[in-house]
Every structure is written in structure tokens, then in C-alpha cells.
Image (cartoon, coloured by chain):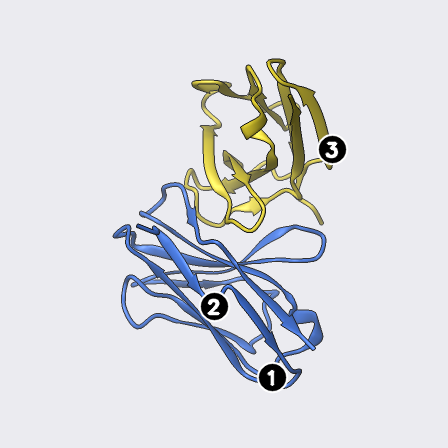
Chain colours: A blue, B yellow
Amino acid sequence: DTAVSQTPKYLVTQMGNDKSIKCEQNLGHDTMYWYKQDSKKFLKIMFSYNNKELIINETVPNRFSPKSPDKAHLNLHINSLELGDSAVYFCASSQSRGEQFFGPGTRLTVL
Amino acid sequence: DQQVKQNSPSLSVQEGRISILNCDYTNSMFDYFLWYKKYPAEGPTFLISISSIKDKNEDGRFTVFLNKSAKHLSLHIVPSQPGDSAVYFCAASAGGSARQLTFGSGTQLTVLP
């Protein structure tokens, strides 16, 4: 059983398109996150979200938006994709203030 | 502005010997530190953590040491095994929780048989 899953694993798209990455966790955690791993391999937090609070990293463009249909899902929507959005995106979850469990990542390539 | 730094991008160690991975931080508000291990094409996996009220935490072959005055932590793996070959990320957070993690750039550990 995969604890944190992401789809798709690979996403290749043209500049200007709108795309979504889905994330699901079956751990019963109350907090979910999105990270971006850039070309220099840094993992940078984009959002953290539980049913009470959305925390947005101030450096994230507003073209990126998280959407949570329920506690087990946090999807990432990206509008008007740009070349610089190419990266690996990781979803993670945690129970309150505990350690985070990561998904396998989605490699996004914008052409 | 890198608040968490892993200055060694790579480290090679013989099987059975000790691996020491280092991490420095600049933000004095950080009070909770974690190490994650990452294999290619997988997400990071939590390994071990330490709170700033401790200076050492041990879990099997893995020990994390924290030197608050030097703003430095290290991960010791003894004995090292070929399966330990992976990228190791140091992460830190404030407020005593594992939310809002700030990650280092990672160190690629290669354990040679």
C-alpha cells in the first residue's frame, strides 16, 4: 500500500498550458504539503495545508494553487506554465507536527 | 539565502566503516532537525530527528549529533552498508514541529563494497 501517491509521475507540456498534479495520502494525516525540487536539488516548500490553515510560501507565484477536495487529497494546479516551472514536485503529509512522509515525485517538463 | 547548508555534495565510504554527513544552519530560531534519505526516482524518506533540547539521538546504526553553539549537526552511520548509498538531506524547522521544513541541498553518499 502506497502511503503518499502522486499522479502523474511524468508530465510534459507546452508553455502557457494549465496542468494539475494529484496527491493522495492514506495515512490519515491532517496536514499535506507541496515541495518543488529545483535544478540545484534544493527542496523548497510551496504550501502547507490542513483543514484550518493554508500557509503559502511567499515566493510561490499565484499561478500555483493547491486545492483540497478532502483531507486525504491535495492537488496542485498550475496555470500558464512557464519554462522555469520545470522541476520535480513532491507531495508530503504529516500528522500535526510530526515527521513528513513524501510521495515519489512528479517530474514536470515545460517545453 | 541558504539557511541550511550541506557543504559536501558527495561522500564515498568503504562498507563497514563510519559515514559522517554534516549540516550547518544559520537561523537561530530552528529548534527541530531531521535527516531524510532519498533514492533515485523516489521521494525522501524520514530517517531520524533531534530536538534542540538534546545533543544526541540514536536509532540503530544512525546517530544524529547537534552542536547548538556551532549551529552544526551531523549524521553518523555505523557500520555503513551498500544499501545506505543515497542522497541524504538535512532539514530544519522552528516552533518544535516538523512543519515548514527548510532543506539543505543534499549529500550523495556512496558506500563501496
Task: Specify whether A36 is left or right of A30.
Answer: right
Q: Whole-percent x and y of residue B4?
A: 64, 40
Q: Nearer the viewer, mark 1 or mark 2?
A: 2
Q: Residue furthest front?
A: B113
> Badge 3 is on which residue?
B8
What's the CA distance linking mark 3 and mark 2?
32 Å
Q: Whole-percent x and y of residue B17?
A: 63, 13
- How many residues crowd around disc 3 within 10 Å: few (fewer than 14), some, or many (20 or more)? some
Depicted A38 relative to depicted A111: above or below: above
Q: What's under tag 1, amino acid-wise?
A: Ser
Secondary-structure class at tag 2: loop
Residue in the picture at 58% in, 26% down: B82
> Badge 2 is on which residue?
A8
Residue in the picture at 33% in, 65% down: A73
Depth order, front residue of B1/A67: A67
Same chain for mark 3 and mark 1? The answer is no
Q: Are marks 3 and 2 in contact (CB under 8 Å)?
A: no
Q: What's under tag 2, amino acid-wise?
A: Pro
**The numbered mark 3 sits on a residue in which chain?**
B
What's the CA distance linking mark 3 and mark 1?
37 Å
**The numbered mark 2 sits on a residue in which chain?**
A
> Badge 1 is on which residue?
A80
Q: Whole-percent x and y of residue B106?
A: 65, 40
Q: Are marks 3 and 1 in contact (CB under 8 Å)?
A: no
Task: Specify whether B78 is left or right of A75.
Answer: right
Residue in the picture at 70% in, 78% down: A111
Same chain for mark 1 and mark 2? The answer is yes
Q: Are marks 1 and 2 in contact (CB under 8 Å)?
A: no
**The numbered mark 1 sits on a residue in which chain?**
A
Quadrant of the rendering where the C terminus of chain B is positioned = top right
